[in-house]
Amino acid sequence: MTLDAQILTALRSRQGTELSVADLAQRLHCSRSTLRTHIDGLRALGYEIVSDPHRGYCLASAPDLLHAVEILSLLGP
């Protein structure tokens, strides 16, 4: 599973609550800067990912189009 798909899966598992950057980076075994880069890429695809400096990231909405990363995130590991 790609890192983008893993990010979406992790954010979906929280059901609208924030996931801290540190927790997400640790869970996915990547650096915070790598995580931010991939979050920006997902935003460019149309995912609305809300960020709060004190709380973390939250998936607010997904685009109406199906991307490969979307399908992979829904399939699971």
Image (spheres, helix red, strand yellow):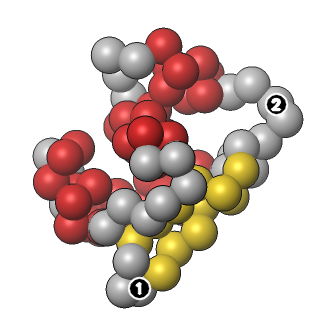
Characterize the local packing of mark 2: few (<14), some (14-19) or many (20 or more) Cα atoms within 10 angstroms. few
Vertical order, 59 against 1 (above or below): below
Task: Give the distance between the C-alpha atoms of the residues marked 2 and 1, in whole angstroms.
Answer: 29 Å
Which residue position is annotated with label 1? 53
Residue 55 % position (x, y): 39, 77
Residue at (48, 13) in percent of width and height: 75
Q: Describe residue 37's horizontal placement relative to residue 47 as left or right.
A: left
Characterize the local packing of mark 1: few (<14), some (14-19) or many (20 or more) Cα atoms within 10 angstroms. few
In depth, the one of 60 and 3 nearer the eye is 60
Residue at (55, 28) in percent of width and height: 69
Do residues under tags 2 and 1 come within 8 Å of each other at their CB atoms? no
Q: Does the rendering let one see residue 43?
A: no
Which residue position is annotated with label 2? 65
Kindly indicate the quadrant of the structure image that contains residue 40: bottom right
Q: Secondary structure at mark 1?
A: loop
Q: Does the rendering let one see residue 3?
A: yes
Q: Residue 35 has which mark? A: none
- Which dot, 2 or 1, sits closer to the camera? 1
Residue 3 % position (x, y): 36, 37
Q: Describe residue 70's horizontal placement relative to residue 75 as left or right.
A: right
Q: Secondary structure at mark 2?
A: loop
Tell which residue pokes out farthest to the bottom in this image. 54
Vertical order, 9 against 35 (above or below): above
Task: Give the amino acid type for the residue marked by disc 2 in the picture.
Answer: Leu
Task: Give the amino acid type for the residue marked by disc 1 in the picture.
Answer: Pro
